[in-house]
Amino acid sequence: MTDQPDELFSAVDSLLAAVDDGTVLPAPAERTRLREAAGLTEAAVAQALGVRVPSIQAWEAGRAEPKGDRLEAYRRLLDGLSRRYPAPATAPGTAADALSGSSGPDAPSPQPAVPATESAQPPTPTVPSAAVASSGPGTGAAAPGRPPHPTAPAHPTAPATAAGQPAPATPATAAGDTPAPTPEFHGPAHALPGQAADSDAPAAAVHPGSAPGTPGSAATRQAPGPAPRPAARRPAARKAAPGTSRTPSRSASAAAAPSTAPGPVDPRFAHGPLAVLDADDDGRVSAYCVGGLVLDVPAASLPDLVEWTLTEARLGQPRLHRSGKDADPLVVLTESACVRYGLPPKLTDEERLAGRIPDTHKAVRQLLKADWLLTRRGFGPWAWVYRPAEGSRRHSVHFCLPSWNALDSRYWGGAADLPPAELAHVLGTYATRVLTPCGSTAVTGLELMTALHPPTRAVRGEHGQWVSAPNPGALTEAVDCAPCEAPDGHPLLAHLPRFHERTPAEMLREEAYDWARPLTDEECMRPYLVGIDVNMAFAAAANRTVVGLGAPAHVHNPEFDPALPGSWLVDLSHVRLDERLPNPFTPDGEPPEGPAWYATPTVAYALELGYEVAPLEAYVRPGHGPYLDAWYTRLRDAYVATMADLGVTTGMAPEEYLAAMERHKSRDPQLALVLSAIKATVKGGIGKLRERGRSGWRPGERWPALDRPTWRPDIRAAVISKARVNMHRKMLATARATGQYPIAVLSDCAVYASAGPSPLDFLPYRDGKPLPGGFRVGVSPGMVKHEGTQSVLWAEGLREEYGDGLNLARYIKSGEITAPDAGE
């Protein structure tokens, strides 16, 4: 018996060795807590570890574990975070639950560690259901319904949060709106505050429909009880009549839409990113939120509505980047809500052309009288109402008016005509997966770049105070482009004679393909023309594209470096390629005739084809990086997730994928609208990098967009150049393997003559596997889908009528000619 303790200790040591052999990771819940405490997004961790976001999600959910070098790297990351952000001692059970992996409904949400220089966020008190139903969800300590940001600095003069977030920028729009500056420290005046939910949600999260009596529970809208007197200028929400339901009827897709509000919810934004307001015949206004929640809106005027949104509605979304800003709440007004708040239900022709109602309108005057401000665009289809920021706290609300054509049908389909609850579902899904809309899809796409890479970050100054500094890897300031990159009318070109037509040797002309050729006799013998379209072609081209981050440097007779972004004056007329393919160096597919300006991907492709290049001069950008990688990742994930909801998933066999694509839009028409908006966000965001002057602008004058760090025509050129080169590379691989050549190419669509009506009748698949380097059928960005099939007789008839200049790729989908492009 004397050696029994030794045996016991040895047994325990063996057990410990078996439990932790140096490769055991923290429990899944603790992994999530550590990442969120550090303000890291899933995309940032995935990029650092060289994996995709679903892998990080699987590791944090306990569905999978990393292996090999990634296991060691992930463990190193978690160990480092655990030293910086230990489990809070003020939340009993949190550390134990995290270590044990328990995450039941009664387990408290983990709190991020609060540095000593900032005051901790007080917990949100529990509110009786009657009070919530009658007075709205405002329960914060600092102000009803709007607790202070959990990372707000304690020191009143600190310009940034201790978590690394600089003070918010003065409100301005991504389209170039710049309101008057304020004395306080602010970030760059170009940035919009719109952000989308990611991983920065603080603790004590609540969610619509969670538990009766908590803010955000639909049940709280029905609880009887007396209403407390509301604070001044913070009108209380009306109590729902006993026994009546305030949850609207919704479509099947809206009812089963957990993806619109995933994971823990920031209590400041417990009701989601946005609300759609609608008024009934009695003038009662209801706010339809994400997840089916409906709130009564007691605001009697537009200024009261802004106050209610900021103090009681609990709308908004956490920032995407630790140095970014939380999204402003978005309020969508239906026609009846417009009338209720003194706005016209529709714009007159004059107002539509101006893009706004007059500043003398009664509703605008009410806002200005209440000390609210508007951007230079005034109150239009997308309006931004704000007050200057106070330190790190913002006071701003976005308005969207669908009846004023805020939701362009080219990108949002018929979303503007949806009932309020369904519109909230569509916009909420988009906001959760992409970003809270803050303008058109193009504006939102551009703002997403800034949200993922804020221009500034907070750093410690010499005396320990927080100061603003450029954020590495971001576009930190507005810079002038190179003269060859400037569009016509730019101030850099003011010296040119009027109506001067610039040559390729004077202007960088990187655009998408628009090329067609006549059918050969052999192709005329095939019965079908089949179009294939590259999924998210510009997003795929943005991935891993190194772009310039600063001003260009002008050099003469440089040695070409394919890793250096810039614009190069090169003569590629000596490159001879098969004429049955479009030339990769020009948008019209015709061979260049002499020296011309090209972006780096185009010149690098000439080297790849085996030709020598000797640039005459160049504008290069020594400071560079993969600025668009995170942008691509978020949009890719949004696209793939939405396609999966529509029944089209990754890993499908080609035949299965093509069959699913035939019916995916009819599976859920509302999600089909979200899908359309996501794709428009990609193209619009890239196009916005070279936004032109608007009405009233004269050539030679500066326009507001030039003052944005994100006005970068060189980045747009690099993405389009890479997309065109990618297209040519795949067409060349297909031609070499099969002898088949496209007869028409339009941007990301290519048309081939085929013996059958399916892409699989001409794409080279062997044993179910695609040709390496060629087109691949599938849902992921860069893969292709079936665009449309028409007969060869159809094509011959059109060309007889309109001539050989007709690009059949433009009409292959529907077969209808609405605006023939012959002769263009």
Image (cartoon, rainbow, N blue to C red):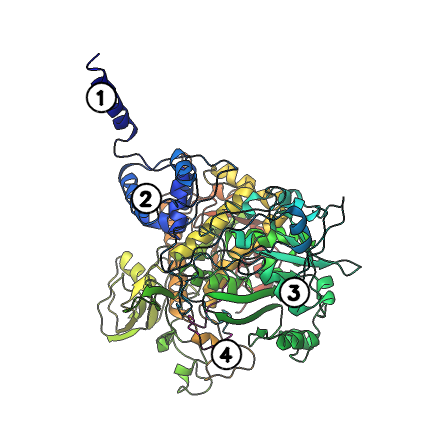
Which mark, residue 305?
Answer: 3
- In the image, what residue occupies the spot 35% across and 75% down? 482
Disc 1/disc 4 C-alpha distance (Å) = 73 Å
Residue 408, by quadrant, is bottom right
Q: Which amino acid does label 3 sit on?
A: Leu
**How dense is the environment of label 2, judged by Cα within 10 Å: few (below 14), some, or many (20 and up)?**
many
Say which label, 3 or 1, has the lower sequence index: 1
Q: Do the residues labelled 2 and 1 touch (CB within 8 Å)?
A: no
Query: SS class of the residue under badge 2?
Result: helix
Disc 4/disc 3 C-alpha distance (Å) = 24 Å
Residue 567, by quadrant, is bottom left
Query: SS class of the residue under badge 3?
Result: helix
Which mark, residue 78?
Answer: 2
Residue labelled with disc 4: 180
Residue labelled with disc 1: 10
**How dense is the environment of label 4, judged by Cα within 10 Å: few (below 14), some, or many (20 and up)?**
few
Q: Is residue 492 above or below residue 640?
A: below
Q: For the magenta stretch, what is the residue range?
A: 177-193
